[in-house]
Image (tube, rainbow, N blue to C red):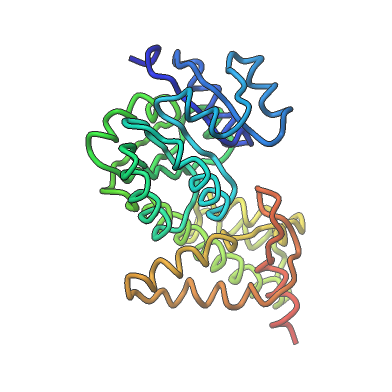
Amino acid sequence: MSTQVQIGLIGAGTMGSGMAKNLIKAGFTVTIFDLKPENVNTLVQEGATAATSTIDVIEKSDITLTSLPTSGTFVKVAEEIIPHLTADKIIVDTGTTEAPQTKRLAEAIRKQGADLVDAPVSGGGRGAESGTLAVMVGGANETVQRCMPVFNAIGGNIGHLGDVGAGQLGKAINQIAMGVGLAAFAEAMFLGVQAGLDPQKIWDTLSTAGAANTSFEGAAKQTLTDRIEAQDFKLRELPYFIAQAKHENINLPLTEALYNFASQGEDRTTDPLGIPTPSFWHELMHRTRE
């Protein structure tokens, strides 16, 4: 089946390129478009075919994956390609998109006889390269089943959570848990550092205590090297999830508190996508220290 289905990919950055390589390894024919020609050229050397535009991709593909940096970028691209969709085409959004926008676009895409699957991924560049991403899927059962060979090529854990929009809700749960949890750990480390404790000794002691886990270990080590200011704690995406919760009449007090505190600060660093992002740690150090 994999050699018969034509796959498209719009967005060949860190995540997209990793997924493309694994799709090619699985035997798919993959057509790529990215605004950076060098990203496309690298994948062409791996066996992909270059496209001239986003529309060129969907016209040549049965299933088109998008791997785009922001919700707004996906919305713009989707609205651009919708008029050109034909029956039985499938768009798979692997990025983090506002769920209400996902549902709105799904309605427009289905009117064309095509379908949308939201399948945001987690696992970072390393997971994309190794084909071990967690894939949180929302979409109609029949459509998702058509996409399963694709998901199996890029992911190690695929969960079909419900209809369109459910994948984005799954991603929200993941990102909120990570962001709020990491921020809580940073605040705890801040308490120790400001009270005069040696951060190395703090971590050496806590590394076998109840608070220890892999994510916290990374934050702790960044504290020791003064690099924790570069942690964005998923701040850029929090407004998506807060808006989504409000749409469902749900309160997220911890998430809102984290975002309201950190977003008042300067854009001290850039997130993994190169987007300026406030630093929670910087705000702790400068606004709560007397």
Question: In terms of image quadrants, where is residue 93?
Answer: top left
Q: Residue furthest front?
A: 83
Q: Quick check: 101 above or below 49?
A: below
Q: Nearer the viewer, residue 165 or 136?
A: 165
Q: Residue furthest bottom?
A: 290
User: Quarter of the image containing the C terminus?
Assistant: bottom right
Q: Is residue 80 left or right of residue 92?
A: right
The picture places residue 259, in percent across and down from the top left corner, at: 56, 72
Q: Nearer the viewer, residue 252 or 249?
A: 249
The picture places residue 257, in percent across and down from the top left corner, at: 52, 77
The picture places residue 275, in percent across and down from the top left corner, at: 69, 55
The picture places residue 91, in percent across and down from the top left corner, at: 41, 37
Q: Nearer the viewer, residue 225 or 99?
A: 99
Residue at position x 34%, y 74% from top?
A: 250
User: Quarter of the image containing the N terminus?
Assistant: top left
Q: Nearer the viewer, residue 172 or 112?
A: 112
Residue at position x 52%, y 67% from top?
A: 239
Residue at position x 32%, y 30% from top?
A: 88
